[in-house]
Image (cartoon, rainbow, N blue to C red):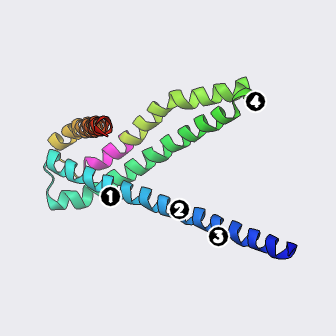
Amino acid sequence: MKRLSILLLIISLFAQLSTIDAQQKRSKEERQQWFKEMREYKHNFLIKELDLDKEQQEAFFPIYDAMEDETFKLHHGTRKLQRDLSKKDADVTDIEYEKAAEALFELKYKEAQIELKYFEQFKNVLTKKQLFLLKKAEDKYTRHLMRQHDKQKRNRSKKDKKD
């Protein structure tokens, strides 16, 4: 009887773990799908704002996406460092704090280096005017997303008050 109880407990534990694993995989897949949709949405936004023709689109977006990926990795690494220090909190040494602070202050500089590297490649694809408008379009895209987010937040707030 004891063996049966232990066996049932182990089976139920494995069933729960497989359910959790499936949820995590689904969550990761959903996140990847969301990133894919956001990238496509940004592409469409930039196409419109920069008035890119088909040939430019085919040449521009692989370069642009590579820049975005490199910048994302840079930010991801810095955020991971911040999270790791926050988890340790009391056990963090002054040297670790200094290294983390240095990484945070260098972030914008490294990001600028990445953008300048890709700017040289963009020169071969975009017109001078499109090069000029690129940063403006990126800023406009960010403001657009923020407005959309605020709008959704207000709508959720109104809906919650009705319920």
Disc tally is 4
- Asked which quadrant contains residue 103, the reply is top right
Where residue 140 sits in the image (x, y, percent)?
22, 36
How far is mark 1 from mark 2, CA to CA? 32 Å
Q: Dot 2 corresponds to which residue?
A: 23
Q: Looking at the picture, tell me which residue is in the foreground, 46 or 66.
A: 46
Residue at 16 percent across and 45 percent down: it is 49
Label 4–label 2 contact, CB within 8 A = no
How far is mark 4 from mark 2, CA to CA? 33 Å
Q: Dot 3 corresponds to which residue?
A: 15
Q: Which mark is residue 91?
A: 4
Dot 4 amino acid type? Asp
How far is mark 4 from mark 1, CA to CA? 43 Å
Q: Nearer the viewer, mark 3 or mark 4?
A: 3
Q: Which mark is residue 62?
A: 1
Q: Quadrant of the C terminus?
A: top left
**What stretch of residues is rendered in magenta?**
116-124
Q: Earlier in the sequence, mark 2 or mark 3?
A: 3
Label 2–label 3 contact, CB within 8 A = no
Dot 1 amino acid type? Pro
- Asked which quadrant contains residue 142, the reply is top left
Q: Quadrant of the N terminus?
A: bottom right
The secondary structure type at the circle numbered 4 is: helix
Q: Looking at the picture, tell me which residue is in the foreground, 58 or 29.
A: 29
The secondary structure type at the circle numbered 2 is: helix
Dot 2 amino acid type? Gln
Where residue 151 sits in the image (x, y, percent)?
25, 37
Dot 3 amino acid type? Ala
- Asked which quadrant contains residue 8, the reply is bottom right
The secondary structure type at the circle numbered 1 is: helix
Q: Earlier in the sequence, mark 3 or mark 4?
A: 3
Q: Earlier in the sequence, mark 1 or mark 2?
A: 2
